[in-house]
Amino acid sequence: MCMAIPYKVLEVKETSLAEIEIAGVRHKVSSALVPDVKADDWVLVNLGTIITRIDESEAKEILNIFKEMAEAVTL
């Protein structure tokens, strides 16, 4: 099963690469599928590729669900 993870975009390069971050962890991913993505956008990333842009409230809701799932398995 694959899951798309929400990240915040820090920077987008002309080479269709974007630097993204969540919880202090940064990655470089492809932004080719969403060419109009820009810094400060929230996006869903799967397999090293931005697949869609989402709003901040949706990103935070998804991250809270992941947190609740992690807490449930560590009880």
Image (tube, rainbow, N blue to C red):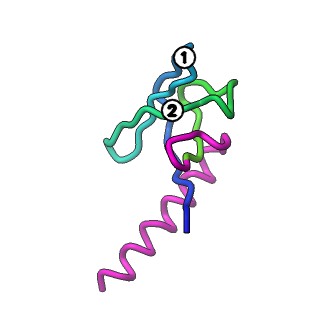
Question: Measured along the vertical axis of the image, is residue 32 above or below residue 73?
Answer: above
Residue situated in front as seen by the camera: 11 or 68: 11
Helix, strand or loop status at disc 2 = strand
Helix, strand or loop status at disc 1 = loop
- Going by the numbered disc 1, the residue's amino acid type is Thr
Give the tally of numbered discs: 2
Q: Position of residue 61 (x, y in %)?
A: 57, 60
Q: Position of residue 71 (x, y in %)?
A: 36, 76
Residue at figure coordinates x 59%, y 30% from the top left: 31
Quadrant of the rendered structure where residue 39 is? top right
Find out whether the residues at labels 2 and 1 contact each other: C-beta distance under 8 Å: no
Main SS class of the magenta portion in the image: helix
- Going by the numbered disc 2, the residue's amino acid type is Val
Q: Is residue 11 shown left or right of residue 50?
A: left
Residue at figure coordinates x 55%, y 62% from the top left: 2
Residue at figure coordinates x 39%, y 82% from the top left: 72
Residue at figure coordinates x 30%, y 81% from the top left: 74
Nearer the viewer's eye, disc 2 or disc 1? 1
Question: Measured along the vertical axis of the image, is residue 27 above or below residue 46?
Answer: above
Q: Position of residue 62 (x, y in %)?
A: 56, 60
- Extent of the magenta region: 46-75
Residue situated in front as seen by the camera: 11 or 51: 51
- Residue lying furthest top in this view? 14
CA separation in Å, label 2 and label 1: 15 Å
Question: Measured along the vertical axis of the image, is residue 2 above or below residue 5?
Answer: below
- Asked if residue 54 is among those painted magenta in the image, a careful observer would answer yes
Q: Position of residue 14 (x, y in %)?
A: 56, 13
- Asked if residue 68 is among those painted magenta in the image, a careful observer would answer yes
Quadrant of the rendered structure where residue 1 is? bottom right
The residue at which mark 2 appears reads as 9
The residue at which mark 1 appears reads as 15
First along the sequence among labels 2 and 1: 2
